[in-house]
Image (cartoon, rainbow, N blue to C red):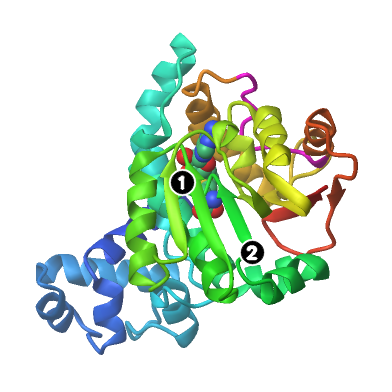
Amino acid sequence: MFSALTGALELCTVEVGRQLGLYAAVRDGADNPADLAKAAGIDERYAREWLEQQAAAGFLTGAFTLSPGMVEVLLDEGGPAYAGPISEFALGAALLTPRVIEAFRTGAGVPYSAYEHLRHGIAGFNRPMFDHLLATEWLPAVPEIDQRLRAAPGARILDLGCGMGYSSVALALAYPLVTVRGVDLDEHSVGEARRIAAEAGVADRVSFTAGDAAAAGGDYDLITVFEALHDMGDPVGVLRNARSLLSPEGSVFIADERVSDEFTAPAGEVERMQYAFSVLHCLPATRAENPVVANGTILRAPTLLGWARDAGYARPEVLDVENDFWRFYRLR
Ligand SMILES: C[S@@+](CC[C@H](N)C(=O)[O-])C[C@H]1O[C@@H](n2cnc3c(N)ncnc32)[C@H](O)[C@@H]1O
């Protein structure tokens, strides 16, 4: 309890630093309260307290500078080690906790659209994996998918539960011949996804639709679902629909949580984090979909493979891809 409190409070101080641009100011040379106050446009007494607290916590050095490693973690948004959005997760979960408490009483859901900070936290946290691993490690784990996307002009990808679309954009950037359509239930995410695709210069090959993955239409060579199947209120319906949209040689490629195959307590650190997300976010958000199934975050491999068989896939398989957070599946 005590170390969890320290962690929760320190994450909130990270969010103070992120929202006020304090880390960027420190990186650019503001290593004392007066300079930080001037550079960031904040009060000097607060600047001193924050600098000291950040150094005490180990985020800054004792000389109030950022180590190169912490610059990567807190400020390098395009880099593989970027983890700044972790503090936004904490803030987002805490802000919605009163609504979750009420939902526990009534059995109602809390819609995904209510979780503004978590939406940005999820997108920002997952983005480095899409930018750096999706086309270098994950899809190449199935050479025939990777080769087809590289070689076949006009290959079509459907990205279900695309959120703010970083995966759809990464696919388009990595595979210049493909077109990608992202589908997500959350309209706000879809609006952000369109902006992000335009900024990345791929809006001519990447489009987004707001809607239920179970009702998406079209004809695709690859259908992807990144950390979203566990959130969907009708996962078997989504997988069945996806099967009907696949070209003859097509596959569904899924990434979902890397949790143990059975309930175990106490759980490992990643599963503990995922369970906390489940209580505070994923389960209430799925309950708001009038679900057939409300799985929560903890989507175990035997459950997913069972859903795939129920949806008519003859050969669902777990892929041999290493990742701290996700497990990967191919359905045919
Ligand atoms: C944890 S987020 C992951 C978003 C994105 N794939 C990523 O990795 O950043 C789960 C997403 O699933 C979407 N979602 C939930 N139920 C859905 C449904 N039935 N159809 C389409 N999208 C859905 C949510 O709106 C949310 O954007």
Q: Quadrant of the N terminus?
A: top right
Q: Is residue 109 above or below residue 326?
A: above
Q: In which quarter of the image is residue 43?
A: bottom left
Q: Is residue 107 above or below residue 154?
A: above
Q: Quadrant of residue 171?
A: bottom right
Q: Name the residue located 73 percent from the left edge and 50 percent from the top edge.
A: 247
Instruction: Write down the residue under mark 1.
Output: 5
Amino acid carrying mark 1 in the image:
Leu
Closer to us: mark 2 or mark 1?
2
Q: Give the crowd class for mark 2: few <14, some 14-19, many >=20 residues within 10 Å.
A: some
Residue 302, percent across and down?
A: 84, 37
Are discs 2 and 1 less than 8 Å apart at CB?
no
Q: Is the magenta stretch mostly helix, strand or loop?
A: loop
Q: Name the residue located 80 percent from the left edge and 43 percent from the top edge.
A: 260
Q: Name the residue located 11 percent from the left edge and 72 percent from the top edge.
A: 44
Q: In this view, does 37 lie above or below 275?
A: below
Tell me if residue 102 can be seen. yes
* Residue labelled 2 has its Cβ within 8 Å of some atom of ligand 1: no
Residue 108, percent across and down?
A: 45, 15
Q: Is residue 15 above or below residue 239?
A: below
Residue 272's label in the rendered image is: none
232, 285: nearer the viewer: 232
Instruction: Write down the residue under mark 2.
Output: 155
Tell me if residue 117 can be seen. no
Residue 85, percent across and down?
A: 42, 59
Residue 89, percent across and down?
A: 43, 49
Please say whether residue 151 is one of the residues in the magenta stretch. no
**Residue interval drawn in magenta:** 292-301
Label located before the other in sequence (2 or 1) = 1
Element marked by disc 2 = loop
Answer with left or right where residue 166 lies relative to residue 150.
left
137, 272: nearer the viewer: 137
